[in-house]
Amino acid sequence: MTGIWKRPSDGATVLARYRELLRLWPAPSEHRTVATSLGETFVIASGPADGPAVLLLHGSAANSASWIGDVAHLATSFRVFAVDMVGEPGLSAESRPPLASGVYADWLGEVMSGLGLAHAALVGISLGGWLALEYATRRPETVSAVVLLCPGGVGRHKNILLWALPLLLLGRWGRRKIMQRMAGGHLPPPASPEAMAYGEFMDLTFARFRPRTEVLPPFTDAQLQRLSMPLLAILGAKDVMIDSNGVRERLVRNVHGAKIIWLPDAGHLLVGHAATIEGFLAGALTP
């Protein structure tokens, strides 16, 4: 373990830019720091204080700025908590125990307790989808609903290194080509100044951050069958990182009532689905 940054100065550079980006957060918010056994965890809270609780869980090599294009919509109805996962390029601790250790569900439980939440809905993308399932399969009684966008740990993981590593050697141009393939073949133009700033921030992060390299621990059928809460999965048919067909098949087979949205032209980068997520959660969380 050599740390999560490529060089000692990289962390300060990326996190300073992250703090600047958070000034563009498009909803009234407060920043919280929760003490956990894995270190301090940074959380951005938005939305009405009496709204149903929703935790937003970002993907690998990312942080809560991932939700900068969605939070304004979601925060109109829900009390939204965007959580920086430990071991990722955010403002939480750099702790990175093995994903198979079982401690991440405990850590997220500590975060919820620190926020005063007895239960919440979980919305996770990629690694965040794995985290949502890791927690929900272990503590289903505390989860009111689950939304998964291209979740890890359900379908077979594809080896992207054969084509991604050569592109990484080509600097910013190569990183953009990687993002295009992850998006399903093309990158949509930024929908807002916040989205443009986030795209520039992600390019900086990829140049300076050491992402996790371990394969996400897979969930068994028995684990998935513990998911009795309302569940929505949004999947891209052109996903280059996971077998989205396998994800769809296993969720339909093991999770009663699972709702699947299949996007034929989408890849692993799924953006612009806030209205769909809000509509699903409104139905799932309304008494």
Image: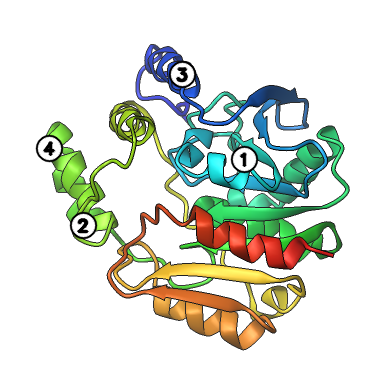
Residue 215 sits above or below residue 60 on the image:
below
Q: Mark 2 points at which residue?
A: 162
| Measured Cα–Cα span from mark 3 to mark 2 | 30 Å
Q: Earlier in the sequence, mark 2 or mark 4?
A: 2
Q: Do the residues labelled 4 and 3 touch (CB within 8 Å)?
A: no
Residue at disc 3, secondary structure: helix
| Measured Cα–Cα span from mark 3 to mark 1 | 21 Å
Q: Position of residue 269 (x, y in %)?
A: 36, 54
Q: Which of marks 3 and 1 is nearer the N terminus?
A: 3
| Measured Cα–Cα span from mark 2 to mark 4 | 17 Å
Residue 99 sits above or below residue 2 on the image:
below
Q: Are marks 2 and 4 in contact (CB under 8 Å)?
A: no
Residue at disc 4, secondary structure: helix
Q: Residue 173 carries which label?
A: 4
Mark 2: which amino acid? Answer: Leu
Q: Residue at image x 19%, y 60%?
A: 185
Query: Is 97 on the left-hand or right-hand side of 113?
Result: left
Q: Which mark is residue 243?
A: none
Query: Is 256 on the left-hand or right-hand side of 99?
Result: right
Instruction: Point out the frontmost of discs 3 and 1.
Output: 3
The image quadrant of residue 136 is: bottom right
The image quadrant of residue 225 is: bottom right
Q: Which of marks 2 and 1 is nearer the N terminus?
A: 1
Query: Is residue 14 in view from this perspective?
Result: yes
Q: Which mark is residue 15?
A: 3
The residue nearer to you, when weighing 188 against 251, is 188
Q: Name the residue under label 1.
A: 97
Q: Residues within 10 Å of mark 1 (few under 14, many from 20)?
A: few
Q: Residue at image x 68%, y 48%?
A: 77
